[in-house]
Image (spheres, helix red, strand yellow):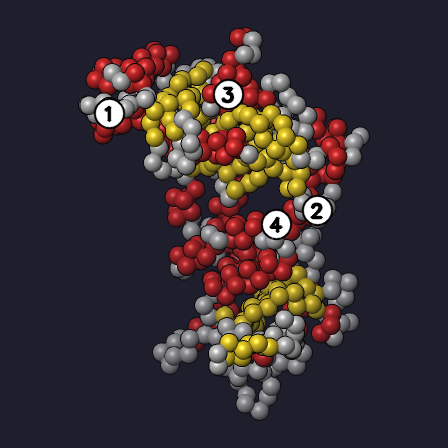
Amino acid sequence: ISIGEHFVIGATTFSLADEKLLLSINEPLPATEKTFSAQDLQAIRYRNADQQIDVLSELPKIISSAENNDDLFGQLVNLLLQGIPRACGVALVAADPNQSSGTSSSPESIQVMHWDSRSGSASDIRPSQRLIWQATQTQKSVAYIWAGKRDDNQPTLTASEDLDWAFCTPINSPACPGWAIYVEGNFEHQSSLEPETFHPQALRDEMKFTELIASSLGNSRHLEKLKRNQAVFGQFFPAVVLDALSSQDPEQYLAPQEIELAVLFCDVRGFSRSSELARDDLLGLLERVSQALGVMTQNILAEGGVVGDFHGDSAMGFWGWPSPQHDSSKRACLAALSIRQAFEQAARDTTHPLHDFHVGIGIASGTAVAGKLGSADQVKVTAFGPVVNLAARLETMTKTVGASILIDETTLAAVQQQPSHEVEMRFRPVAQVQPFGLQNALQTTELLPVLADHGQPSDSDLAAYEQARKQFQEGAWKEAQELLEKVSDQDPVKPFLLDYLKKHGPTVPPQWNGTIVMTSK
């Protein structure tokens, strides 16, 4: 269907119209005006953060999953309307950075990239050109209040005659020159409301919420801009790959190929609780999560790995591409141990930003497809295949098992083939498990550092657990339970087998094959 055409279903006619949003250049001066810097808004405490937290939880998904700018802008505008109940309309605009408000009086100097209103009609929102220019020129959020200054004989900001307020928040990012978020709406009109209700301070929750979205959008756009040049690869590739890229065609060198990989998935634990405790400092929480992801990526790169996808508060790394690595599994294990050590050190320092975070890591090795996907405007380096799914599943299983790091049989075999003096780690077979949603069972193994300290199991604990595991797998559950009781209660993996025995024992199932079938992720 084209613009201007229509179709009929029953008694209803559907028409496709192309509504243009017009800017206002003659609206009355506001009764009150106030400017807020980004620092001002970040220092403001939410009065009621519950709704904003719920809505903002969708922001990472929106930014990461948007297929194009139209999709991204549309979802962000809808998110703003959802998070600001008092808003009547929202527009994402771009002012020409090469012009100033003094020399540019034409609305054409401001582009409306996307808009929406509660009614869905363009007649119900007409952004103030003066307000947009003021915000983008000063790079500060500006609020106008018209409440209490209505004059029926004068034009108003929009076709709506009861508009109370509007504010514009600039997107401070070199990737978004002149961009801003424009929001307008109404206060609750009740005779009992105090005069300060009709003041820019009454919009502090809405403006702080918008500033967070503007900051997130600006940061994401800036990252996308970096991806369009060679320097961006430094965030994904180790030095040896960057050196190769300088002398080879990136399109050919980074082209997808089927290859043997070691894949690592690492997830930050404690994020949900931290988000509840930090509801008045969401930007601070975002910074802490960024630091956590930074620890992961630094250690992946330090061991010669490639940083793949980010999934919210988790990261993926892989070894063996774009150039084969004979010790890819060992490198993945060393990176995992370094990540674990960094978070354990942070946990012992109550002043450290990552004090209340810990990690779960899964590693699997095998054949997968890895490469650069996307166009020149949007680069994405990733790997996919069964081995990737297995690594992700092992990472999830660490919650149930109680281990910080779980690896598969292929990874264990590959590392054990390395010369003994090069293996700087310990292994503990945990159990034969069939992960939820997978057809095949596998022997899961916990990866541990060489030195047993800070609550890590000793070699004697590992030996006692191994005896119990063998008895358990062979069907001697009574003996297995007796042996497990001798393992230190400080061993975080001990409850996994012991609880299973208490729940399903003491009688061994008649068709027991030594495999624990996981019933959930």
Residue depicted at 66% across the width and 72% down the height: 2
Dots 1, 4 in contact, CB < 8 A: no
Secondary-structure class at tag 4: helix
Q: Position of residue 515 (x, y in %)?
A: 34, 24
What amino acid type should be assigned to the residue bearing mark 1? Pro
What amino acid type should be assigned to the residue bearing mark 3? Thr
Residue depicted at 68% across the width and 56% down the height: 176
Q: Is residue 357 above or below residue 183?
A: above
- Which residue carries the number 1 mark? 509
Q: CA distance from mark 2 to mark 3?
A: 34 Å
The disc, 3 or 4, on the residue closer to the chain's N-terminal end is: 4
Secondary-structure class at tag 1: loop
Q: Decide if residue 458 is on the left or right side of residue 199.
A: left
- Which residue carries the number 4 mark? 220
Q: CA distance from mark 1 to mark 4?
A: 53 Å
Q: CA distance from mark 3 to mark 4?
A: 37 Å
The disc, 1 or 4, on the residue closer to the chain's N-terminal end is: 4
What amino acid type should be assigned to the residue bearing mark 2? Ser
- Which residue carries the number 2 mark? 375
- Which residue carries the number 3 mark? 410
